[in-house]
Amino acid sequence: MVVDHLVAQGYAIVERNWRMNHFEVDIIATKGADIAFVEVKTRRDDAVNPLSAITPQKVRRMASAANAYLGCVKLPLRPRFDVAAVVGEPHSFRIDYIADAFLPPLRTYR
């Protein structure tokens, strides 16, 4: 459902369920000079906001996964992190898509 939404918005899907070692990205898509690393969260009902599953640990893991991916493919694109929240059943659902949902954390050294 989210892939269809992205394609309708003009994105090219590069990867689905990309994995490398312990890294995983649900969808990797490009549009113009951007490459979007998309995390998809689904829930059957509105009782719990799917976006609440985007924890600081998840943000760090997504940033590490994106870094690993970009290190492998060497694409000259600007990375960004998007989140798609899907609520409902397959025949009746709502997609809340947040482009540039967060910035990756900066590493600090001591």
Image: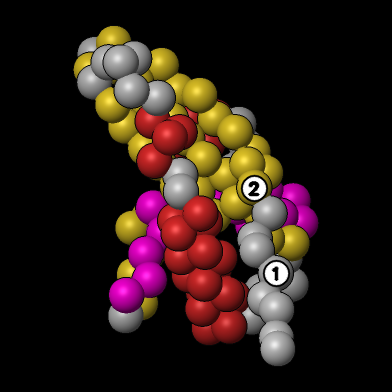
Residue 99 found in image quarter: top right
Badge 1 marks a residue whose secondary structure is loop
Task: Say which quadrant the N terminus sits in.
Answer: top left
Residue 33 included in the magenta stretch of the image: yes
The outermost residue toward the bottom is 110
The outermost residue toward the front is 110
Residue at 43%, 35% in the rendered image: 52
Residue 100 found in image quarter: top right
Where is residue 37 drawn, in percent x and y? Answer: 54, 55
**Label 1 packing within 10 angstroms: few (<14), some (14-19), many (20+):** few
Where is residue 67 drawn, in percent x and y? Answer: 57, 75
Q: Main secondary structure of the magenta part?
A: strand
38 lies above or below 10: below
What span is colored magenta in the figure?
22-36
The disc at residue 106 is: 1
Residue at 72%, 65% in the rendered image: 77
Residue at 40%, 24% in the rendered image: 49
Tell which of 85 and 33 is nearer to you: 85
Task: Say which quadrant the C terminus sits in.
Answer: bottom right
The residue labelled by disc 2 is 102
Residue type of the residue flagged with mark 2: Phe
Distance (Cα) linking label 2 and label 1: 12 Å
